[in-house]
Amino acid sequence: MPVSRRRFLASAAATAAGVHTASAAAAVKKPASTSKRLGLPDPSTIKVGDPADLSLLECASLLQNRKLSSVELTRACLARSRARDGETTAWIRVYPEYAERLAKAADERLAPGSEKARRRKSPLVCGIPLALKDLYAAKGLPVTASSQVLAGNVATGDSTVWAKLRHSGMVLLGHAHTDEFAFGVGTPQSGNPWNPACSPGGSSGGSGAVLGARMVPAATGTDTGGSLRLPASACGITSLKPTFGRVSAYGVIPLVWTRDHCGPMARSAADVALLLSYMAGADQDDPSTLAGPAVPSGGYPHTPTRGARPFAGKTFGVARESVDELPAATAKLFARFLDEVRALGAKVKTVDMPVIPTGTIGGVSSLAETGVYHQQFAPASTGRYRAELQAVVAASIGAQALPVSDYLTANRDRTRYMHEYNALFAREGLTCIVYPGSNVDGPTRKTVAGLTIFSLLAGSVTGNVVWANLAGVPALSTPIGRSDATGMPFGVQIGMRAWQEAELLQLAVDYQAAHPYWADAPKPLATPRDIPTSKVITGPKGKPDPTNTDAKHPAFQIIPTLATEPA
């Protein structure tokens, strides 16, 4: 997409003024005319021909001002998906009838003077199509973790995230592929929209690909070892791994309960902020969500800070050992990024990150939790996992026989890592920490085939991503341009301390307003595909968990801390 398009979008973003959560939006009287009062771009500045090309904020502006219907937008996204998903195969299923029904209900809700409008003002995400990662339960629809082990499995209830988004009027277009049960750092079923021979990242690669290919404006993902951030870097989009417990994981098929983070994916940081505003919050079904501060009453920020130097007084810490491993082309992009943040007023300094404790990545603390979940499928279904996962699943089930002291020691080490991470921020006066998005410039699908988050070899491709999962802190991935060697997108990870989503999103919005690389789009793939479809099954019966599997979270959970040393 041309630079002029990026400049236009940056200018449009600068006119927006605020965001409301679902509850806050309901309490605010919606003006009949200006989008400015709605906290959205002026609809008269939105000059996109195909509705499928619209960003989340642009969709919201046109829908709220009734310049576009949800039915029209939903049909455009389905048409775009069928026209382009032949080589990416990012969707595992779409739900045309269900989506049409939800879109019509959204239009009714958005209609002026309707009974529903009088009772409850429409949230700003009302009517916007969404992709769920194929781990999130939606009642009456398949949820299969992109695995033959769960072929034919139908959700018996809604995940908390989907329940929140459905209540807010969003339209479920379909489920996007995940690496099988979210084990891997790639998503082998799917191709990257910038080059289908390349990986879209994993395990939320399907979500990354549908966003990058402009098939849908919003998606969800999960992140146990970089699985929100890796697809964002690979596909040229934006994602946020929130603080552990910021977004409920109830009704989401788990990989490692104490490391699984659910989060938003979209094209820009502003879009991600709006989506998070409707996803986040306390949930009695996931006690980890009760530990942190409340979601900001006005939602998460999506408007740029005024002035030419929004980063004045901020210090970016760079983990130099990770940067030194970069190929020349992406090292050049990373160096340019640092120059860009300096020009916005930031101070940049090299720092030494705490050492990752042994046993916390592929050791018993992770494998044992995975085994607790997957033992329900053994031994009858063991052969239905793809070949390279069968040994990992067997090892995870076997890990339950190891001493419980190993598990407890690993989690004590993890708490110590949290303290050391916080101490680094305090000692160095850091605002944020910065890591490259990956170690490899445009990894091919073959490069990442078979690599799981439990494999130490995965680090040679992904770089360091587990720091944010172990610390439980928010980490955002933003595009910083494309490699002049491969033409593929590349991003950076930016992390802060626990519960600082608002500050992190503001920083990312400010950066993207000045450098809107997120607005670049790949050349359209004219590769049609007859995507599998499903209809809602009324009243499905099965296990009480919404996923229709034994996915109940254990009472033991990690609680993020701001402490710098044990109490």
Image (tube, rainbow, N blue to C red):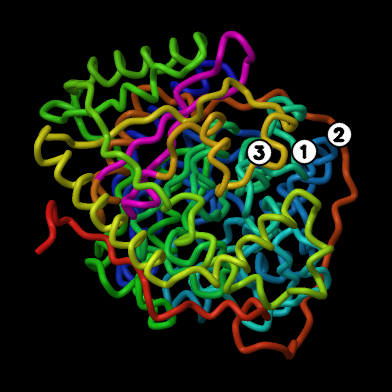
- Does residue 98 appear to the left or right of 152 in the view shown? left
Q: Amino acid at mark 2?
A: Thr
Mark number displayed over residue 88 = 1
157 part of magenta stretch: no
Q: What residue do we see at 52% from left, 28% from top? A: 519
Please tell me which residue lies in front, 90 or 522: 90
- Does residue 200 appear to the left or right of 80 in the view shown? left
Residue 306, position as x, y percentages in the image: 20, 31
Query: What segment carries the magenta color?
Result: 467-496
Mark number displayed over residue 96 = none
Label 1: element kind: helix
Q: Amino acid at mark 3?
A: Arg
Q: Which residue is mark 2?
A: 527
Q: Which residue is mark 3?
A: 214
Q: Are marks 2 and 1 in contact (CB under 8 Å)?
A: yes
Residue 114, position as x, y percentages in the image: 53, 76
